[in-house]
Image (cartoon, grey):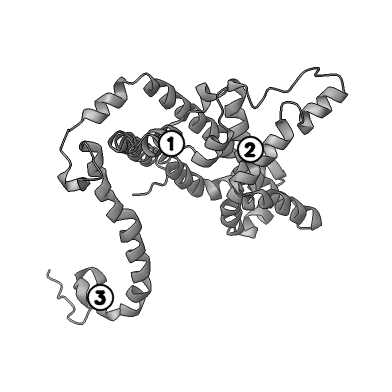
Amino acid sequence: MKIKEEKNLPVSNRSTPIRKRMLQSYELYLFLLPAILLLIIFNYLPMYGILIAFKDFKPSLGILDSPWVGFKYFERFFSMSMFHVILKNTLVISFYTLIAGFPLPILLALTLNSSPAGRLKKIVQTITYAPHFISIVIVVGMINVFFAPSTGIVRNILHSTGLLNGNLEILMNAHSFPHLYVWSGVWQNIGWDSIIYLSALAGVDPSYHEAAVMDGATKFQRVRHIDFPSILPTIVILLILNSGSIMNVGFEKVFLLQNSFNLSTSEVINTYVYKIGIKQAQYSLSAAIGLFNSVINFFMILMVNKISSKLGQDSLW
């Protein structure tokens, strides 16, 4: 039996031509236009410079007139003695930062959300949020004040208690550098990074907790079975996004903490690119290294996103 189609059904947005949809909502697109222009100017147009990685770039000739050399500078980078050193240092610091810095804001958010509202909770939030607004230069200055070899606060305390007789060599110790970098970053960002999880927790229906309390659930059980599942999609998305910057170690702090004594663990891809690109004017080599860095990040975010979707979790696409 045939069913007659209704003639006056509303047409779906997908069947409407894109030009007509844009004209219908032109005010929204006008608001979007400045952001699109900024994205094109500062994110897409600079991609033209990728050509430098495949050319023997001469500033006097420009990008187009410089001779093509193919993968010469990539091969040169992979054969350099520093390749394994800076790659290892970058990965060690990146994964250390991810392991130490990613779960702690989640724990802080769950703890604050479970705490009763009051002055103490506000004080804790203020104390943990405030370091985010301190510049990297000041953070490094504070590290130097605390851990200076002969005049640092930590050295003076240890010396006065008889636990240390000589100078404190943390800043000059290569093995201490990753710990200084990572934990100073955790201290600076733990509060700020917890805000997005607190926002997700604010959307949890209070009736879930009320029902759980009536069933005799403890606070830990409510966190485990109500709060944590509610922020799991946010955790997964942020983990995917963080995996896309696994090869990017903060240049400013590394460069400011770096010295000749800790160079074996503090020389990362970003600082090495700065030294050969800006100081030594090896533009093509530095562009090749930077492109290698970006490609690894791109494949990392694709891989983690694919794994997340295979496991049935949220993904970016």
Residue nearest the viewer, comparing 208 with 269: 269
Determine the residue located farthest toward the front in the rendered image: 60
Q: Which mark is residue 21?
A: 3
Query: Residue at (80%, 57%) from the top-left corner?
Result: 119
| The N terminus, quarter of image | bottom left
User: Which marked residue is nearer to the observer: mark 1 or mark 2?
Assistant: 1
Q: Is residue 87 above or below residue 278?
A: above
Q: Which residue is mark 1?
A: 270
Residue bearing the label numbered 2: 184
Q: Give the left or right position of residue 218, taking residue 78 as reference.
A: right
- Residue 116 lies, in percent from the top left, at 76, 54
Residue 52 image point, x, y percent: 24, 41
Instruction: Give the percent coordinates (x, y) of residue 35.
Output: 37, 66
Dot label at residue 69: none
**11 lies above or below 177:** below
Identify the residue at horizontal 61%, vertical 58% (top origin): 202
Task: Kindly identify the amino acid type of the residue bearing the numbered disc 1.
Answer: Asn
